[in-house]
Amino acid sequence: MKKKIIIGLIPILLISVAFIGVILFRSGFFARKKKHEAAPAGYKVELVKAFPFSEENALKEWEEKIFKDKVVYRIEKSQDLSYVRADARAAASALYYKIKLDAKSKQPVVSWKWHVDKFPDKKLPENLEKQDEDDFAARVYVIFPAFFFTNSKVLEYIWAEKLPVGTIGTSPYSENIKVFVLKSGAANPGEWFTEDRDIIEDYRKAFGAGPEYNIGAVAFMTNTEHTGSSADAVYDEINLGYKKDTKEGL
């Protein structure tokens, strides 16, 4: 019985350790830019988990990791739309969901919708690889936890204000966190953008080889702790699944 309990706790411990690693990376405990082509969308997906954020209690499935004070995440409805609004005021906290996806023998994919209403106020030029003013209005993470958290890998997708779309950088907190700029600059009010990412393709572009570990969590965050300013963004329809061979509608 004790052996079964211990075995059952291993996945939970691995995810927890990975997030401890992310906290240490962001705190600077551990201390190259290039271009990439956008991954092709339009492939058919075997859906594993969908987050429509259509219910008032939809965020109860998610856990929060606080880096500095709490970002206000709430379900908001406007006409026939329902989504998560993130309101950060000199704060940084992420919502994450633990999920196991096979990244070694299958083709995991992630998609979501987002929009930025307000960017953090920065005095310095925007930069992916410096901790100074490392605030972004919207971030989505795919996390590959390892038993030793220093070996964990992270793909981070951001909406920047001025950095060129297509830039890939290394996080200032760790070589194991690779950052993709998917959107840049202000959008029209109320205009949503959908992202469809082939996780394995992105991983290879970022790290030069396929994943050593399976996916253990997905997360999203709006943060403004470095600038002490505010930012506002919305997220919706986060979907996780596996890419199928036939190319049809998503």
Image: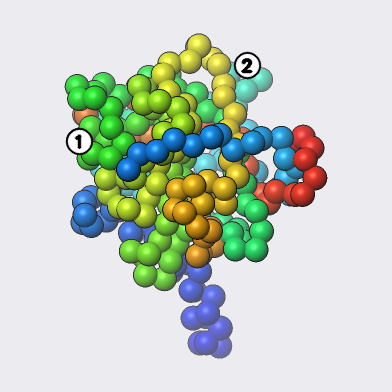
**Quadrant of the frame with the C terminus:** top right
Q: Dot 1, crowdedness within 10 Å: few (<14), some or many (≥20)? A: some
**Residue occupying image coordinates x 37% and y 50%:** 177
Name the residue nearer the viewer: 247 or 102: 247
Residue highlighted by disc 2: 79
> Which residue is the extreme one toward the top?
188
On screen, residue 55 versus residue 235, left or right, reads: right
Q: How many marks?
A: 2
Q: Secondary structure at mark 2?
A: loop
Q: Nearer the viewer, mark 2 or mark 1?
A: 1
Q: CA distance from mark 2 to mark 1?
A: 39 Å
Q: Is residue 139 visible?
A: no
* Residue shown at 50% from the left, 65% from the top: 212
Q: Residue at x 57, y 21 (%)?
A: 192
Describe residue 158's horizontal placement relative to residue 225 as left or right: right
Q: Which mark is residue 166?
A: none
- Which residue type carries mark 1? Asp
Return the x and y of residue 29 as percentages of the image width and height.
21, 56
* Mark 2 residue type: Gln
* The one of 77 and 224 positioned closer to us in this rendering: 224
- Say few, some or many: other residues with alpha carbon within 10 Å of mark 2 (under 14 / 14 to 19 / 20 or more): few
Instruction: Name the spot of residue 249 as percent of width and height, x first.
Output: 77, 34
The residue where tag 1 is placed is 132
